[in-house]
Each structure stands twice: as structure tokens, then as C-alpha cells.
Image: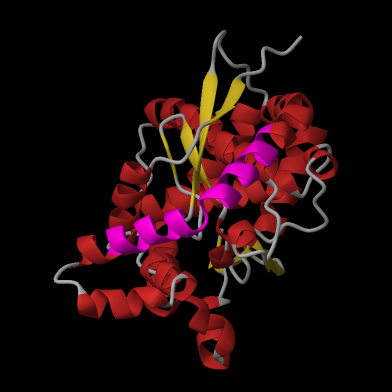
Amino acid sequence: MINNPKIVIQLPNKEKEYELFSRFFNHQFFKQHRNYILNAFPKLNKLLKNFENEESALKNLIDDFYAEHESKIEAIIQGHKAAIEERRDDALQALSSMMEYEWEDGAIYTGIPTILPFCPFEENRFYFSILTEIKNQRKENVLYIAIHEISHFVFFDYLSAIEADKQIQLGEAVKYFLKESLTTALFNTEPLKNILGIDIDSGNPELRELFIQKSGGAKSRIVDWIKSEYLASKELKEPFLVFLAELTQKFNSKSKEFEEKKDFWNKHGYSIFENKELLEEYKKPVEI
């Protein structure tokens, strides 16, 4: 029997929200996150002009939003707690099987709701956005978010061992594209695909038009390529850690190219999808 970790859903923490908003509003690596926040909260542009500093404007935005939606937030969180309990074990067992990972006794992951328009994580804590639900736009699949972030925790656990064994150290851009594309590939593969109710998972926007090309071969989207590599490895009955170590070295050999892709995204963001020339440039494959 797999020793599944607990997933504990906490109440929002406004002090933490202040810190998260401030961090991602001026993040050195996730530079487009500033635009994500401004697009999600059009009122913020006016507040930035009326307050003497960004911190005060962001705090005012958060305080007002929580005050306006307090009862709705509470109801949403209760609903998510029930949803997590219902299929948590099935999803964790599938993830454990696919990544060949076993948790230590007493492992706990903490999920914290946030009104950010994205879902950051740190250590064994992940933040899940409830913004679209509050705005009555879409009900979030919090189990999907939880398993997505937990897969990153497993990835980083493996990565520490791989970097030590191979005497390499991945740059931030390589690490980002590797973890996100790996998780998305797994989410497009049974049994997780079925358990999480996924049709097609395109992953984070940076992945959707990011292509890989093997020497002499056709190009394919990065998520599709990793999925095919994963399935081929399973067919050969390779341990997951062997597959991941090989994948890590391939990505690491193209550090410069992945850094350029991330810089390009940071500069242009969603404009890439609206401009033919930008899109064609971004779609130029990374040759692995």
C-alpha cells in the first residue's frame, strides 16, 4: 500500500497575500506576472497612481477584494476541501506509480488559496488561485492544481540527486521548462489523465508553442516530445530516475537556448500569440 501524503487546505492569509503580490509584481524571472496581475485587476492601475508606493496600492487592492467577497471565499474553500478528499488517494497513487516515488511517513503538503491569477509554490506549500471562481468565470479543479504542484516537489527531490550524481547544476530557465513540460506530459498520460478528468492539457502558456527537434527528425511540441520519450522509456522498463536523468542532461545541454526562450517570453508574453512574426520566432525549435 502506497504511503500517501496528506493534503491540508488552509484558510487564506492576507499577510502572505501582500508578500506574494509584491514579490510577483516585480519578479526578476517571471516578468510577465506583473501583466497577469494588472490584467486580472484593472482597478490596480488607478490605485498605483493614487497611492504613494506599490506596496500600499497592492495592500489596498487585497483588503478591498477580501472584504467584498468574504462569504464567497469561505464557501469556495469548503468546496475545495471536499473535492480534495474525494479523489486525493487515487491521484496520488497514480502520480507515485508514474514517477516511481514513495513518500516518507507523515508527509504533508499544504494548499493555501490565493487571489493571484496564477498558482505559485514554495517548499511543501502550494497556492491555488480562486480568482476565477470568485468572479463566477470558472470552477477550478483544485485536485489538478495540487497534484501539479506535488509533482514539482517530487521533481525537485529527484533533481537534487541527479545534479549531485552528474555534477551539473541547472539554470533557472532550464529547470522551469523541464519541470513544467514534464508535469504536463504526465498529465496527458494515463492513468493521471483519466483520474484528473483531462482531455488535453496544454500546460503553461510558455509551453504551448515551444518546439523540440531531434537531429534529423521532425519537430514536435515540447510536451508531446517528452510524453513520447516517457512512454518509450516505460516500454524499455527503464526506472523513472534513469529516464529523468537522461532528460535532464539533454535539457542542460541546451541551457542557452532555453534561456533565450524564457527571455523572449518575458519580453513579449501573450503578444507572441497575436503577432505572426513573434510567433514564428518563438516556434523555432530547440534542437536536442
Quarter of the figure with the C terminus: bottom right
254 left or right of 147 in image: left
Can residue 111 be found in the magenta stretch?
no
Return the x and y of residue 201 as percentages of the image width and height. 72, 57
| Tally of numbered discs | 0
The one nearer the camera, 215 or 176, is: 176
Quarter of the figure with the N terminus: top right
Give the magenta-colored segment's residue range: 58-81
Q: Which residue is drawn at 29% across and 58% down?
A: 59
Q: Which residue is drawn at 26% across and 66% down?
A: 57
Toward which corner of the image does residue 38 lie, by quadrant? bottom left
The one nearer the camera, 209 or 258, is: 209
Q: In this view, does 234 lie above or below 105?
A: below
Secondary structure mostly seen in the magenta stretch: helix
Q: Which residue sits furthest left?
A: 52
Q: Which residue is drawn at 50% across and 86% down?
A: 278
The one nearer the camera, 172 or 144, is: 144
Residue 284 visible? The answer is yes
Toward which corner of the image does residue 55 lie, by quadrant? bottom left
Return the x and y of residue 133 as percentages of the image width and height. 64, 57
12 left or right of 147 in image: left
Return the x and y of residue 271 as percentages of the image width and height. 50, 84
Q: Which residue is drawn at 44% across and 71% down?
A: 41
